[in-house]
Image (tube, rainbow, N blue to C red):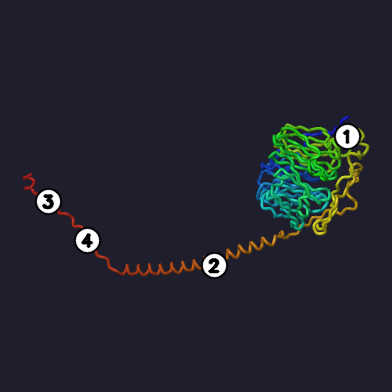
């Protein structure tokens, strides 16, 4: 008998219209490597139509939004990726086509004006920054991937990129493993790779999807499996599952469909549910990912007539466990945003905590600091917290975990010494050119003064010489008519 998923009855439940956000104006930027929205337990963030701006909405701000909605301003180009800190729901980071990253502290009341400044600006890429991902267990450690083929690992408090991992090609996706020691990437050369996050060494690499379009990936951290989604040579969408212990070929591969939409994958570490949304259509498929064959058990699919421009997945601590809500998404359409709840129907969920569906989840407190990660080379799996506190009302904070602290250092990011030396050479060369020009200018000014003196002397000589009088014309004599003349005529 075919194996089935215990989550196969999960159904998507769209929120009522009065809980939708309408009159939205998201960006028109084109970028296949991002999801074009992000959310935390406090806010939803969406790149906005005004270039370089980002709208931030409270979860209770639904309804018709004003046309002059307050936004975050500061980037010199469109925002193409954004993410909230997993340890601070008010701390938002945005990546832009202007090659910079900005961090923002969102006020608890949300945005009331356009005057909220960024608290940190990270400059380390030479081309657009399109992928941002926070370390799963270290506080204030952010990875950024740009079109310059570099991944920078930042301590966002100090604004310093401690590690730079270089590639010969453009990154399409980037994910951390469970303890942050490794990164998974997919690149334009159709490779899926695992990279040491400190040394940049490629520890494993394989040929993935052979189609020319963008391919995305996601790391199922607890299972140590990587899922990639892309296109084959015939432009059919396909899905592959990779075992990180044996990376020579995928342990599972299947064709999805012939749609042309680029995927937006999400993975729930607690239920092992894989959700696959698509840009340009309104479908979300969901599967249970298994460690043993068959690796994927199909559960169901949500379909909307409204094409998706973006998706984001809410943190676990925001779910209604008494309704057996196993996941919640925000769906970004052309003119609206609405919540989408994934409900697993269970009769006893109101009176009995469903422990098999809600196991201990990743905590909202970091396990290690950025200093421990960078300076002490320490790795750590994320802390966990029991979701039972959501059922009985006691909350779900790890009792032994310190709260995340973000106090940015107001200093310029460190610059490589070779860049400083090169700039010094350019400055010296420019000074020499200026000195040469000053010498040429002094010679030209002396020549000009001599010519002006010569001209003045000639003009004085000319004014002292008398001019000859001009002859005047004598009018011709006009004959006078007489009577004899008239008679002869």
| Comes first in the chain, label 1 or label 2 | 1
Residue underneath mark 3? 480
* Disc 1 crowd, CA 10 A, few/some/many (<14, 14-19, 20+): few
Furthest residue toward right: 352
Q: In the structure shown, which secondary structural element does the residue marked by tag 3 occupy?
A: loop
Q: In the structure shown, which secondary structural element does the residue marked by tag 2 occupy?
A: helix
Q: Do callouts 2 and 4 mark residues in contact (Cβ within 8 Å)?
A: no
Residue underneath mark 4? 471
Residue underneath mark 1? 6
- Quadrant showing the C terminus: top left
Q: Label 4, label 3: how many angstroms apart (C-alpha)? A: 27 Å
Q: Is residue 109 visible?
A: no
| Comes first in the chain, label 3 or label 1 | 1
Q: Which of the pair 210/445 is nearer the observer? A: 210
In this rendering, which labeled residue sits more in front, label 3 or label 2? 2
Q: Quadrant of residue 372?
A: bottom right
Q: Label 3, label 2: how many angstroms apart (C-alpha)? A: 85 Å
* Disc 3 crowd, CA 10 A, few/some/many (<14, 14-19, 20+): few
In this rendering, which labeled residue sits more in front, label 4 or label 3? 4
| Comes first in the chain, label 4 or label 3 | 4
Q: Give the label on residue 435, or none.
A: 2
Q: Position of residue 204 (x, y in %)?
A: 78, 47
Q: Label 1, label 2: how many angstroms apart (C-alpha)? A: 80 Å
């Amino acid at each position: 008998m075919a194996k089935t998923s215990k989550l196969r009855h999960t159904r998507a439940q769209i929120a009522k219209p009065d809980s939708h956000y309408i009159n939205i104006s998201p960006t028109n930027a084109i970028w296949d490597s991002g999801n074009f929205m992000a959310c935390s337990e406090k806010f939803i963030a969406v790149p906005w139509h005004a270039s370089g701006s980002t709208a931030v909405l409270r979860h209770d701000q639904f309804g018709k939004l004003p046309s002059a909605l307050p936004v975050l301003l500061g980037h010199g180009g469109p925002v193409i990726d954004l993410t909230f800190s997993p340890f601070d729901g008010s701390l938002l980071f945005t990546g832009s086509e202007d090659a910079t990253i900005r961090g923002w502290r969102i006020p608890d009341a949300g945005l009331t004006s356009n005057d909220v400044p960024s608290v940190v600006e990270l400059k380390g890429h030479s081309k657009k920054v399109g992928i941002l991902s926070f370390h799963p267990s270290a506080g204030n450690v952010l990875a950024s991937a740009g079109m310059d083929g570099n991944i920078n690992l930042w301590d966002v408090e100090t604004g310093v990129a401690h590690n730079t991992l270089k590639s010969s090609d453009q990154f399409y996706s980037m994910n951390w493993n469970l303890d942050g020691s490794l990164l998974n990437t997919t690149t334009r050369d159709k490779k899926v790779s695992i990279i040491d996050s400190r040394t940049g060494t490629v520890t494993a690499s394989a040929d993935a999807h052979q189609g020319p379009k963008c391919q995305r990936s996601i790391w199922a951290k607890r299972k140590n499996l990587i899922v990639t989604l892309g296109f084959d040579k015939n432009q059919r969408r396909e899905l592959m599952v990779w075992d990180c212990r044996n990376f020579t070929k995928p342990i599972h591969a299947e064709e999805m469909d012939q749609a042309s939409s680029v995927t937006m994958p999400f993975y729930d570490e607690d239920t092992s549910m894989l959700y696959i949304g698509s840009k340009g259509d309104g479908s979300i498929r969901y599967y249970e990912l298994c460690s043993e064959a068959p690796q994927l058990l199909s559960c169901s699919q949500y379909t909307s007539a409204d094409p998706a421009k973006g998706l984001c997945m809410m943190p676990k601590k925001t779910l209604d466990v008494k309704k057996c809500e196993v996941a919640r998404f925000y769906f970004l359409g052309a003119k609206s945003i609405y919540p989408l709840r994934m409900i697993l129907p269970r009769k006893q969920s109101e009176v009995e905590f469903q422990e098999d569906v809600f196991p201990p989840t990743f905590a909202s407190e970091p396990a290690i600091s950025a200093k421990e990660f960078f300076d002490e080379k320490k790795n750590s799996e994320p802390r966990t917290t029991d979701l039972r506190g959501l059922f009985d009302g006691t909350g779900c904070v790890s009792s032994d975990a310190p709260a995340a602290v973000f106090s940015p250092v107001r200093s310029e990011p460190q610059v490589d010494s070779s860049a400083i030396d090169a700039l010094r050479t350019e400055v010296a060369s420019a000074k020499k050119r200026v000195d040469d020009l000053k010498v040429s200018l002094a010679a030209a000014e002396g020549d000009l003064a001599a010519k002006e003196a010569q001209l003045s002397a000639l003009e004085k000589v000319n004014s002292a010489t008398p001019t000859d009088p001009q002859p005047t014309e004598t009018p011709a004599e006009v004959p006078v008519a007489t009577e004899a003349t008239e008679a002869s005529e």
